[in-house]
Structures are given as structure tokens and as C-alpha cells.
């Protein structure tokens, strides 16, 4: 490939605001494709130019490189997921898929050994960018907890054809609406499992990390009739962005676009985790998730506590209780933590073993709620 004409073309596309096309061209250039029409090597992480090479790029293209790197870091790009065995504790980790008009997505479902067809809770886990169901399961340890509590856990997998880095497209308008795009696929997977297994419909939950956390927020707002509670880890509020540029701005500065209004809708109990040193998805986004969950709520009582994990992070925990004393919102700020699943295992990517254990706390919060 002749690099310089392609750089000029990427610069032109960037100036015209056609960032998706410019990014695709840049990735082909960086991977050394044989010609402009050939596909890049299937690699989840684009290899960016060295710092010295970057400084010699045209200004507009250099800014695009920085934007792609920034988006990748914020949505979970980094090292390839290390292939680690998922602790199953005697259960089964099976693969299946779901198809509707929006496409097809595979998923992996953990079925605990103690499951005998009795109605059980279901937790939907949405991974971050470059991650896979196996990686996310290994990092969060949710299958081990599922075995202990006797519940099902499903991990929908983003397809690389839908996003080169396997990010859920939380910033695309078509993927932020009920029964459209990716929300329809995730809801479809949820319903398919409910149809094929004995799931208690009053205890169906959804959680995610980073891009998956942002998508979990969307699912809770779009499907309050399906999900009983939501967990958002290092994510963003539903409607925080409408395209790639606004996604980058929201990640860096906190919500820029007006988030989707929750007032007047059925509010789903929500638990939020965010590291206060997160340099890729600003902790201000956690504030926006909390504000969205509280929209229109009156008469809640607030409780605040601080704690310290032995040998690990300190944290602040805020609970918002309704008139019956139920915690309808719980917020955890993990002091000194960055962009990683709190209390996770090093067997997976984007985890911080120094706690507190987000998986355990989310599951505790989830199981304290059931829909009527």
C-alpha cells in the first residue's frame, strides 16, 4: 500500500467528519493491507504508530490517531485477552446464539451443577471492548458465584463484524432504543434463555463493564419490564453520546450530550461502581448514571459509609433508600482505582484484584430485589 496517498485520504475524511471511514482506512494502513480494498488482519487491537512516527503525521491525521487510541483505552482496548480456563465448579459453560432482524449474536451460558430445573435468577453480563465471554467470566468470577448461589449467568458476545474491537455500540442512536439494534439482540438472548430454562422472571438482572456498562444502563432504561436491577461498572449513562466524537468527549469529560431522561419511566434499581482515578472513562460519568437513576425520585433517604479492603483500596459507599427502607440505588467509589473491574481476578483482563469485590456486591444487591 502506498502510505502517503492513504494518509492524505484519511486526513480528508477526518476533516469532513467521516471518522468511521477514516478510522477504517487508518487501521488498514497500520496493518499493511495489500491494497485499499483488502481486509485488515483480524486483530482486536490496532497497532498505532510510534510516538516519533506520530509526530510526523499531518495534524488532522495525528488527531485521529490520538482519538482512536483514546477511544480504545476508554472502552477497554489493550492487551489481547489471555486464554484462561473459566472456573466452573462442576457446572456447564455452553455456547449458543440468537438471531433476529438486527443480526446474530453468540453467547455463553453458565449452568450451575445444582440446577435441576427449578426457577432460578438470571444475570446478563456485558463485556468491555476486546473482551470475550470466557475472558469476562474469568475476570469477574461470576461463574463461581453462580455455582454458590445456584443461578444462571449469560455472557452475550459482541461480533467483530459489528465493531472491530468487539465494543458494544452504546454511542450509536440505533443501538440505544428498545427493540432495535443491539438492545433487541441482548433482550432477545435474555428471553431465549428464559424460554429454554426455568428462570424466575422476577429476578432477571443485567450488568456490564465500560462499553458493556454503558449498554447495561441502556438496557435498564429501555426494558424495565424485563430487568429487575442493573449494575454499571466504569460505564456511562444511557444517551450520553450520539456518535463517535460525542462518545470520546463524554468519556473524557463526563456526559456532554443530554442523557436520556428517566423521569416518568419505571426506574430499575441500580448499583454503580467507578474508580475515582479512572483516566479513560471519567468518574463524572458515574455521577451521571446515578443522576439518571434518581431522576424524578422523591423522598429517598441517603446513607453514606466508608471502608477499606485489607491490603487494597478504600471506598465510599452511598445508599439511597425508599420509604420502605429498600436500597433502590447503591453507589461505590473506589479510591485510587482506575479503569478495571473491582475485586476481579488476574485470570481475566481489565481487573483490579485489590477490591472491593464488585461481582459479590452486585449479586448481593441484585438478589435483594425482585420485581412484582
Image (spheres, helix red, strand yellow):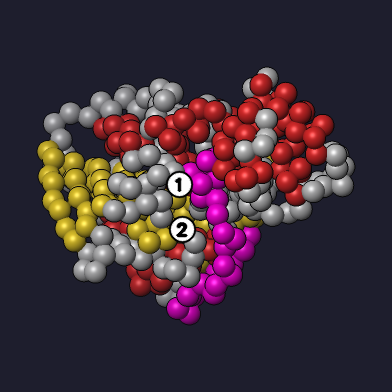
What is the magenta range?
A: 70-96
Q: Residues within 10 Å of mark 2 (few under 14, many from 20)?
A: many
Quarter of the picture containing the C terminus is: top left
Give the residue furthest to the top. Answer: 16
Quarter of the picture containing the N terminus is: top right
Q: Quadrant of residue 142?
A: bottom left
Q: Residue at x 25, y 26 (%)?
A: 296
Spot occupied by residue 331 in the image (x, y as percentages of width and height): 25, 46
Spot occupied by residue 158 in the image (x, y as percentages of width and height): 60, 49
Residues 86 and 283: in front is 283
Spot occupied by residue 144 in the image (x, y as percentages of width and height): 41, 71
Task: Identify the element where label 2 is drawn.
Answer: loop
Q: Quadrant of residue 284?
A: top left
- Residue 210 bears which disc, if any? 1
Residue that mark 2 sits on: 350
Kindly indicate whether the residue at mark 2 contacts the one at mark 1 (C-beta within 8 angstroms): yes
Q: Residue at x 20, y 50 (%)?
A: 316
**In magenta segment, residue 73:** yes
For the image shown, how many numbered marks are present on the structure? 2
Is residue 17 depicted above or below 69 in this figure? above
> Is residue 252 at all visible to an observer of this figure?
yes
Q: Residue at x 26, y 65 (%)?
A: 312
> Is residue 92 at all visible to an observer of this figure?
no
Residues 11 and 155: in front is 11
Task: Identify the element where label 1 is drawn.
Answer: loop
Residue 116 relative to residue 276: left or right = right
Tell me which secondary structure the magenta stretch mostly adopts.
loop
Is residue 97 depicted above or below 52 in this figure? below
Residues 231 and 235: in front is 235
**In magenta segment, residue 183:** no
Amino acid at each position: 500500500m502506498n502510505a502517503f496517498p492513504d494518509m492524505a485520504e484519511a486526513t480528508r475524511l477526518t476533516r469532513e467528519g467521516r471518522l468511521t471511514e477514516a478510522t477504517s482506512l487508518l487501521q488498514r494502513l497500520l496493518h499493511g493491507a495489500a491494497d485499499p480494498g483488502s481486509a485488515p488482519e483480524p486483530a482486536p487491537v490496532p497497532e498505532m504508530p510510534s510516538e516519533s512516527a506520530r509526530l510526523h503525521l499531518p495534524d488532522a491525521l495525528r488527531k485521529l490517531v490520538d482519538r482512536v487510541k483514546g477511544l480504545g483505552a476508554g472502552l477497554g482496548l489493550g492487551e489481547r485477552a489471555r486464554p484462561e480456563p473459566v472456573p466452573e465448579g462442576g457446572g456447564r459453560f455452553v455456547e449458543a446464539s440468537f438471531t433476529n432482524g438486527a443480526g446474530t449474536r453468540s453467547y455463553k451460558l453458565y449452568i450451575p451443577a445444582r440446577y435441576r430445573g427449578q426457577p432460578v435468577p438470571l444475570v446478563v453480563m456485558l463485556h468491555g471492548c476486546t473482551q470475550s465471554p470466557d475472558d469476562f467470566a474469568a475476570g469477574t468470577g461470576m461463574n463461581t458465584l453462580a455455582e454458590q448461589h445456584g443461578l444462571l449467568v449469560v455472557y452475550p458476545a459482541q461480533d467483530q463484524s459489528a465493531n472491530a474491537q468487539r465494543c458494544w455500540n452504546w454511542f450509536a442512536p440505533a443501538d440505544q432504543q428498545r427493540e432495535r439494534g443491539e438492545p433487541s439482540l441482548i433482550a432477545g438472548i435474555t428471553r431465549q434463555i428464559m424460554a429454554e430454562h426455568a428462570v424466575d422472571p422476577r429476578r432477571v438482572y443485567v450488568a456490564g463493564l465500560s462499553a458493556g456498562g454503558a449498554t447495561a444502563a441502556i438496557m435498564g432504561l429501555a426494558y424495565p419490564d424485563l430487568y429487575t436491577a442493573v449494575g454499571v461498572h466504569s460505564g456511562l449513562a444511557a444517551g450520553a453520546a450520539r456518535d463517535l466524537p460525542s462518545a470520546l468527549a463524554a468519556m473524557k469529560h463526563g456526559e456532554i450530550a443530554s442523557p436520556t431522561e428517566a423521569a416518568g419511566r419505571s426506574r430499575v434499581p441500580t448499583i454503580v461502581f467507578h474508580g475515582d482515578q479512572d483516566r479513560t472513562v471519567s468518574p463524572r460519568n458515574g455521577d451521571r448514571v446515578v443522576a439518571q437513576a434518581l431522576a424524578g425520585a422523591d423522598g429517598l433517604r441517603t446513607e453514606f459509609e466508608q471502608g477499606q479492603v485489607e491490603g487494597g483500596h478504600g471506598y465510599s459507599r452511598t445508599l439511597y433508600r425508599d420509604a420502605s427502607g429498600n436500597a433502590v440505588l447503591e453507589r461505590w467509589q473506589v479510591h485510587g482505582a482506575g479503569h478495571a473491574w473491582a475485586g476481579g481476578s488476574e485470570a481475566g483482563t481489565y481487573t483490579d484484584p485489590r477490591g472491593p469485590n464488585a461481582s459479590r456486591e452486585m449479586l448481593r444487591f441484585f438478589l435483594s430485589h425482585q420485581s412484582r
